[in-house]
Amino acid sequence: MPELVTVDTQLLFVFNLIDSKRTAYIKEKIRKYHPVASYGAGFGSSVQIFNGLEKEELRTLVASSDVIVAPSISEGFGSVHTEAVAMKKPLLTTYIASIPEVVRGNVKFIAPASRREIVQAILERDQWIQNPEYTLPYKEFSRNTTVKEIIKLYH
């Protein structure tokens, strides 16, 4: 983030932190590099921090974004990721846990915890967003198909 806020003044960083063991650490890191970050509503700063937005607020935020950057180091299902691709928003994320299995569309995968790759991908976002190499075919998740696959497993 320190490199990016000085290079590209158009960027707005929004952190939606869900309470975990790492929350205090992440907030401290953000404050270290950007002490004027705003907390809560309002976009007076290039860095915004929210504490667990409700689903509707999260969807509104994703819908109003040009690119979603969600570089997880651990992940369950990936709510932000699936919201982004459902809205056909370009997504920059990490190749970790279930994420490669559930996201499709304009997705660029980077290595987990690779600061260099995150910075490079954000700075080059216009290039990869337009590149068909990063558009994965959309996947349908059908209940009927899932049931059939489970039955096959039991046989």
Image (spheres, rainbow, N blue to C red):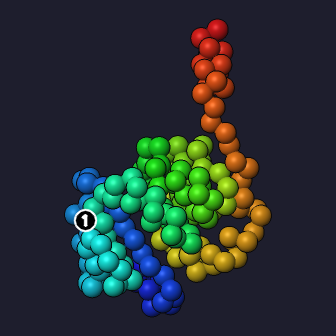
In the rendering, at what x and y percent does residue 135 appear? 72, 59
Q: Provide the residue designation for mark 1.
A: 25
Res. 21 in view:
yes
In the rendering, at what x and y percent does residue 52 appear? 30, 57
Q: Total of numbered circles in the picture?
A: 1
Q: Which quadrant would residue 123 be assigned to in this image?
A: bottom right
Identify whether 32 is placed above or below 115: below
**Where, quadrant-wise, is the N terminus in this rendering?**
bottom left
Residue placed at 29% from the left, 80% from the top? 37
Residue placed at 77% from the left, 64% from the top? 132
**Where, quadrant-wise, is the C terminus in this rendering?**
top right
In the rendering, at what x and y percent does residue 145 appear? 66, 26
Residue nearer the viewer, 109 or 11 = 11
Residue nearer the viewer, 90 or 95 = 90
Q: Secondary structure at mark 1?
A: helix
Res. 30 in view:
no
Identify whether 63 is placed above or below 138: below
Near mark 1 (Cα within 10 A), the count class, few <14, some 14-19 or many ≥20, is few
Q: Decide if residue 138 is on the left or right side of residue 2.
A: right
Residue placed at 62% from the left, 14% from the top? 151
Identify whether 53 is placed above or below 35: above
Q: Decide if residue 137 is on the left or right side of residue 113.
A: right
Type of residue at label 1?
Tyr
